[in-house]
Amino acid sequence: MDPVLTIVLGATVLTVIGIMSGGTFLLRIASHGLPFNGLQKTFFRAGHAHAGVLVILGLVSALLLTVAGVTGPWLWSAVGVLASAILIPAGFFLSVLGQDPKRPGRLIALLWAGVVVLALSLIAVGVSLIVAGASAIA
């Protein structure tokens, strides 16, 4: 595996500590009745869930690409999945900051940017795996 990508993946594993602390924050909201409205609670939960799932998906994507023997820039498509693990949760969290927001703010655009990055990255990961598999058959 590319050494720089290995460092990126190691740093990504460490981000799970931050996701864990986000879970603690959600527990405090639920159990201590912190002053957040329903929209904020819903968006915080969604951001937390997406962060965890997308980090796992990014790590699995990198592993699959490496095991399949994908090299070069295609191997880096997994980093796009990891980038979406930052953008999508950031859109959820940052778009509802403030006191009693009634609807998401402009930073919801981060969520949609993350969705585009995720879709393009997953297309690249999937096509790379198919090409690698087809090349191995031939």
Image (tube, rainbow, N blue to C red):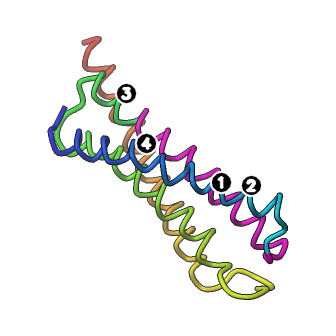
* Residue hosting label 1: 24
Where residue 87 appears, as percent x and y from the top left, is 48, 65
The alpha-carbon separation of the residues under discs 4 and 1 comes to 23 Å
The alpha-carbon separation of the residues under discs 3 and 1 comes to 31 Å
Q: Secondary structure at mark 4?
A: helix
Q: Quadrant of residue 6?
A: top left
Q: Secondary structure at mark 1?
A: helix
The magenta stretch is 35-60
Q: Secondary structure at mark 3?
A: helix
* Residue hosting label 2: 27
Asked if disc 1 and disc 2 are in contact, CB closer than 8 Å, the reply is yes
Asked if disc 2 and disc 3 are in contact, CB closer than 8 Å, the reply is no
- Tag on residue 58? 4
The alpha-carbon separation of the residues under discs 3 and 4 comes to 10 Å
Q: Is residue 44 magenta?
A: yes
Rendered view: 64 above or below 89? above
Residue at point 38% right, 39% down? 125
* Residue hosting label 3: 64
Label 3: how many Cα within 10 Å (few below 14, some 14–19, many 20+): some
- Quick one: label 4 or label 2, which is nearer the N terminus? 2
